[in-house]
Structure formats: structure tokens, C-alpha cells
Image: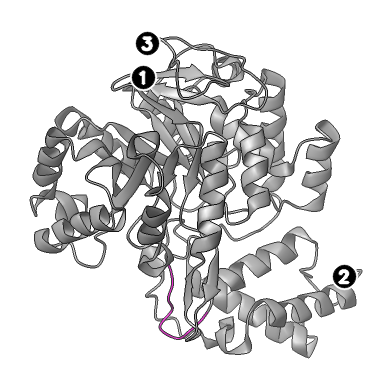
């Protein structure tokens, strides 16, 4: 995973100043939608309170560095008790985002059990179509026939109430992802290339989770398909410490830079884990920058590399949106010293044995009703809080025992807890982080039972 890696000092120098255009981008900090940067130009400073934009030089798209990930819209229960998107709150969030310069909105047919595209489309329809960019995906995991894939594509246009898509992605490619089966052998790549030629798809790319070898394979297709952008997982932990089978983000970004392919960043907070860090890490970040949020460090890191077009955040709550807008209005790129500080912070994070769940919910619904993300995230929260005991002889064992058991029942209803896992493995193939979910659930269940019986 280290092959051909960027020299660390060179990256620190380049990323810390952001003083060059990489990946076909011009960097414009603190500018309104008018006045895009000239081709190949870069502006390092901007007006306080105004969003930073990056210009995709291949077609002039001027994209806000902060993109809205529409996978985590707020939900409410309808009159039948069903979880539905809270459209009123979605409208409120989108209004604030657009008012403060956000113009990139990323969704998918499978997000929120199929509700995200329509909710996003209803809200964005209130604005002029040319004032924002829509990104969505071909999520043909369960049925990759040509007929179903084309129907899914057309349904996305209908749900989003648009005649064209600005950014269209082949969803969640990686090792053994069936790229040929899902997109080549069924003729979908030919279809999508024709749609791009006709202008109904303005930019065609893919999102990726997998090994360097899997990414190399997708890069080999660039000469044939001319990827307009690629969406990768990048944050200061995954830069050199990616979990499971995922490639380090350092390698992925380097390979894209070689080919002048702009990147769109997902999981800048590792599913929220970099905003809910262990207290020791939070204190370390706060000591360095008392006025900055813990999350802002991760967003500045993701935006610092000049090859990044846009950084996505799934902002469910207004306070998260406001904090991220503040961080990018304008973006102040990290210095060499700050990048080195985060590199050390990432090393410290490795000492906390959390499960790499990003709360994407791709593993849901579980056929046995288990709330998989809630169980894993609760465990991670307790690890970070020092509430996971190794032995009954540990100092503070009784306090940790009570804290874990009480909070577990509050976080996850009993009928949805890990004890119900039978190891059917249906969830594993859907996890982009390559987590052995049944194994982790069984480990947590054993831990809970040992706590109950005082047998640690």
C-alpha cells in the first residue's frame, strides 16, 4: 500500500500552501459564484465569511469545497409509525446551505431506504437549476441487469426533478465489486457514455472502497472511459492508516493526481468518529486551537490537498452545517506543522481499538431486526470514553460495567441487540469498510454477557 507514495515532506509543502492547481482544479477561496479563477490559477486567501470554491478546469464547474451529503437527512415518524424524511427540516438545512454558498449535493437511490433522492429533489427544485450541482449514483447492487440499471438511472432523474445530472457515479466499486458484471458486460458503460455525450450526464465517475490493486484496475480503464472525477474516502486517519481492505487515502489521491482526475471526498469524519474522538485526543486538539471545533481539524485536512474538488459531509443537524460552513468560509489550508501534528494524532488514534463503522447503514436492514450500526457505534463511544473494561480487576471496573450496560440498553432496544445475531453473513458483502460484522457482534454480545455475570 506504500508503493509510489508521495514523499511526506513534499506533500506537507504542497498541501500546506495549496499554491498550485492539481487534478485539473483552480482553487478559489472566499469568492461568490461569479468570478471563477482563471485556468490553472490558485488563490490562497479569501474574504472572511465567504465560501471557498474550486473550479474544475475541464468544464468550468465552480464547486463549493463543502458538499452536502444527503445520506443522513433528519427523519421523523409518520402517522403510521414509519420513518420518513423530515422534509421541513431538509428545506431549512438546504436553504441555509445555499444561502452560505454550498452548491454541491450528493445522494443515491439507496440512501434512507430510497427516500433521499426524492426529498433532495423536492427541496432543490425551489432554486434555479443552474445554481447547484446534483450528484447521484447507479446503485445496481442487487439487480445489475441492463433493464433495471437503466430504469434506476431514469428514476433518479425523475426523483431529482431534473433533465440532467451534473455528477454521476458508479456506486461503491472495489475489489471483487463486479465492475464488469454491473457495468460492462450488460452494456451499461456504453449507455452511460452515450448519456454523457448527449449532456444528460455532465461528469461521469465512480466511488471506491478497496485495495490499491482494485484501484489500479479502475485506473487502467481511464484511457478508455475518461473518468471525470472519483470519490474516495479520505481523512487524517485513513491517509496512512486505512482499516480492513481499504487502501490508504495517500495512495488513492496520488494516483488521481498523476492523471489529473479531481477527487470528491467522502467520510472526512470517518462516520463521525473524528468528531467524537477519545477525550485525550479532543484535549490535544483543543489545546492547539481552543476556538476551533474538533471536527474542523478533519475538514481542513480533507480540503487542504489542492487535488480535492469537494468534501462531502452528511449534516443532519443545523449546528453541524453551521460549523462546517464556518470552517470553509474560507478554507485556511493546514500548514506543514499542522499536518505533522495531525499525522501524530492519527498515530495516537490507532491505540484506541474502535470498530471502523462509519454509520453508512449499507448493512441495513438486518433480516433479524438487529440495529447493527447502533451496536457498533455504542461500543466505539464506550471505548473512547474509557468505559470498556478488560478485567474485573481493572481500576474503575464497576463504574465502567454499569455505564456500559445502562447505556447499551438505552442506545439499542433489547430486541435489536447483538444477542440476536445468528451469523447469516448477509450484512458482510454490503460493508464498504470490510468489517466482519457477525464476528464483531458476537464479540460485543460475549462482552455484555460477561459484564452481566461479572466474569471478565
Image location of residue 123, percent across then percent down: 43, 53
Q: What colouring style does the render use?
A: one colour
* Residue ID for mark 3: 39
Residue mark closest to the camera, 2 vs 1: 1
Mark 2 lies on a secondary structure that is loop
Q: How far, Cα to Cα, is label 2 from label 1?
A: 55 Å
Q: Is residue 357 visible?
A: no
Asked if the residue under mark 1 is in contact with the one under mark 3, i.e. CB atoms within 8 Å, the reply is no
Residue count near mark 2 (Cα–Cα under 10 Å), binned few <14, some 14–19, many ≥20: few
Q: Is residue 277 visible?
A: yes
Q: Earlier in the sequence, mark 3 or mark 1?
A: 1
* Residue ID for mark 2: 394
Residue mark closest to the camera, 2 vs 3: 3
Please tell me which residue is depicted at 31% across the width and 22% down the height of the picture.
Answer: 259
Please tell me which residue is depicted at 22% across the width and 45% down the height of the picture.
Answer: 163
Q: Earlier in the sequence, mark 2 or mark 1?
A: 1
Q: How far, Cα to Cα, is label 3 from label 1?
A: 9 Å
Q: Quadrant of the C terminus?
A: bottom right
Q: Earlier in the sequence, mark 2 or mark 3?
A: 3
* Residue ID for mark 1: 24
Amino acid at each position: 500500500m506504500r508503493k509510489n507514495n508521495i514523499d511526506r515532506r513534499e506533500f506537507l509543502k504542497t498541501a500546506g500552501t495549496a499554491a498550485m492547481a492539481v487534478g485539473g482544479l483552480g482553487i478559489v477561496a472566499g469568492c461568490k459564484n461569479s468570478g471563477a479563477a482563471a485556468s490553472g490559477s490558485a488563490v490562497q486567501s479569501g474574504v472572511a465569511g465567504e465560501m471557498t470554491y474550486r473550479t474544475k478546469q475541464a468544464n468550468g464547474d465552480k464547486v463549493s469545497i463543502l458538499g452536502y451529503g444527503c445520506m443522513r437527512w433528519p427523519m421523523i415518524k409518520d402517522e403510521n409509525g414509519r420513518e420518513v424524511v423530515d422534509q421541513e427540516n431538509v428545506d431549512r438545512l438546504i436553504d441555509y446551505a445555499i444561502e452560505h454558498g454550498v452548491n454541491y449535493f450528493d445522494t443515491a437511490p439507496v440512501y434512507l431506504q430510497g427516500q433521499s433522492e426524492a426529498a433532495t429533489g423536492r427541496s432543490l427544485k425551489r432554486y434555479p437549476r443552474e445554481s447547484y450541482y446534483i450528484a447521484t449514483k447507479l446503485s445496481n447492487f442487487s439487480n445489475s441487469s441492463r433493464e433495471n440499471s437503466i430504469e434506476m438511472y431514469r428514476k433518479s432523474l425523475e426523483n431529482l426533478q431534473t433533465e440532467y445530472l451534473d455528477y454521476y457515479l458508479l456506486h461503491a466499486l472495489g475489489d471483487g465489486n463486479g465492475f464488469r458484471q454491473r457495468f460492462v458486460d450488460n452494456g451499461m458503460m456504453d449507455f452511460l457514455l452515450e448519456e454523457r455525450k448527449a449532456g444528460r450526464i455532465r461528469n461521469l465517475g465512480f466511488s471506491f472502497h478497496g485495495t490499491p490493486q482494485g484501484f489500479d484496475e479502475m485506473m487502467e480503464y481511464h484511457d478508455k472511459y475518461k473518468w471525470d472525477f472519483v470519490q474516495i474516502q479520505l481523512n487524517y486517519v485513513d491517509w496512512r492508516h486505512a482499516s480492513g481492505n481499504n487502501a490508504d487515502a495517500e495512495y488513492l489521491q496520488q494516483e488521481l493526481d498523476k492523471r489529473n482526475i479531481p477527487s470528491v471526498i467522502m467520510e472526512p469524519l470517518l462516520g463521525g468518529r473524528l468528531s467524537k474522538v477519545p477525550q485525550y485526543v479532543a484535549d490535544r486538539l483543543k489545546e492547539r486551537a481552543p476556538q476551533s471545533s474538533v471536527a474542523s481539524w478533519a475538514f481542513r485536512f480533507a480540503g487542504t490537498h489542492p487535488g480535492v474538488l469537494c468534501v462531502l459531509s452528511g449534516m443532519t443537524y443545523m449546528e453541524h452545517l453551521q460549523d462546517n460552513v464556518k470552517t470553509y468560509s474560507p478554507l485556511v489550508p493546514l500548514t506543514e506543522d499542522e499536518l505533522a501534528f495531525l499525522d501524530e494524532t492519527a498515530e495516537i488514534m490507532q491505540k484506541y481499538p474502535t470498530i471502523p463503522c462509519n454509520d453508512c447503514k449499507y448493512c441495513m436492514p438486518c433480516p433479524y431486526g438487529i440495529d447493527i450500526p447502533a451496536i457498533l457505534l455504542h461500543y466505539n463511544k464506550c471505548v473512547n470514553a474509557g468505559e470498556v473494561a478488560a478485567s474485573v480487576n481493572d481500576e474503575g471496573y464497576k463504574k465502567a460495567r454499569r455505564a456500559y450496560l445502562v447505556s447499551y440498553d438505552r442506545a439499542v432496544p433489547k430486541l435489536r441487540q447483538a444477542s440476536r445475531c445468528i451469523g447469516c453473513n448477509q450484512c458482510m458483502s454490503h460493508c464498504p469498510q470490510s468489517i466482519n460484522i457477525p464476528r464483531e457482534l458476537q464479540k460485543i454480545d460475549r462482552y455484555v454477557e460477561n459484564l452481566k455475570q461479572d466474569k471478565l
